[in-house]
Structure formats: C-alpha cells, structure tokens
Amino acid sequence: MREQYMRNGEGFILVYSITSRLSFEEVNTFYQQIRRVKDRDFFPMILVGNKCDLEGDRRVSSQEGKDLAKSFGCLFIETSAKQRIRVDDVFYDVVREIRRMNKEQEGKSKDAFDLTESNGGDCCGCILM
C-alpha cells in the first residue's frame, strides 16, 4: 500500500524528529524506497526536522539535516507541529517544488522533436522522444 502512495505521489515531505537519532536515520530508508518506486533520482521533496521547540532535547543537529537534504538534492526546514512553527511553509514549499518540476517537464516535452512544427503543421501532432 505504501508503495502505491509513493508511485502516485507528486511530492514528498520526509519528516524526522530532531529529538530522535533513529527517526533521522530512517529518513534515508524512505528516501531510497521512493527513489526505487519512482525509478528516478529527483522528485519534489522537502526534508523536515520537526520538534524545533525542543532544542534542549536535540539529538540531530541542524547541520546534519542540511547536509542530508543537500545529499538528497532537496530543501530543508525545521518546524514545530506543536507550536505551528513553519508548518505551513513546508506545504507551500512542496507545492512550489511540484509546480517547478511540472514546468520543467512541460518544457522538456516542448523541446522534444514535434512533427507538427517540423512538417509545417501538416501532421497529426505526434511527438517523438
């Protein structure tokens, strides 16, 4: 069931708790699973370190989160769901990433060899890729 959600998902928010080293390490497992299911290296995604309101209990540094996000090629943000700190930003950012990727994909299909353009518009509108 999880793989079906991954296959259909356009964007992903990978969340770990800054107070749990184990949850941080598990994020990589989910990332690898999404890569396998999506069969590509890049997809809209944001890495989120949650519980930033519990700074005194921190087990994962901000730098570790930034470094992991960089290795994934995605954005990184720390939030607090409890105190609603930057939670909305995460959702806005993932939607922006999805839209950006859709525009890039749209641009790539326009760059593909379009027979309607190369034949003076006399063809059926097939695109060869």
Image (cartoon, rainbow, N blue to C red):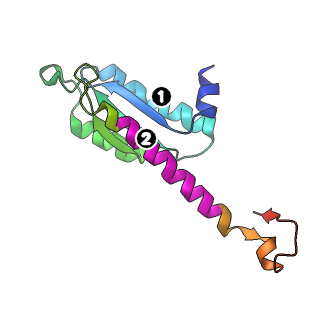
Q: Which residue is mark 1?
A: 29
| Residue 61, percent from left and from top | 21, 33
Residue 101 image label: none
Q: Amino acid at mark 2?
A: Val
Q: Which residue is mark 2?
A: 94
| Left or right of 35 in this view: 110 | right
Q: Nearer the viewer, mark 2 or mark 1?
A: 2
Q: Main secondary structure of the magenta part?
A: helix
56 and 122: which is toward the camera? 122
The stretch in magenta equals: 90-108
Q: Residue at x 55, y 58 (%)?
A: 104
| Left or right of 100 in this view: 115 | right
Q: Is residue 92 magenta?
A: yes
87 and 20: which is toward the camera? 87
* Relative height, residue 28 to residue 94 (above, below): above
Which residue of the protein is positioned furthest toward the front in this rendering? 121
Task: Determine crowd level at label 1: few under 14, some 14-19, many 20+ residues with C-alpha closer than 10 A.
Answer: few
Q: Quadrant of the N terminus?
A: top right
Task: Determine crowd level at label 2: few under 14, some 14-19, many 20+ residues with C-alpha closer than 10 A.
Answer: many
Which residue of the protein is positioned furthest toward the left in this rendering? 56
Q: Quadrant of residue 17?
A: top left
Q: CA distance from mark 2 to mark 1?
A: 20 Å
Which residue of the protein is positioned furthest toward the right in this rendering? 123
| Left or right of 57 in this view: 24 | right
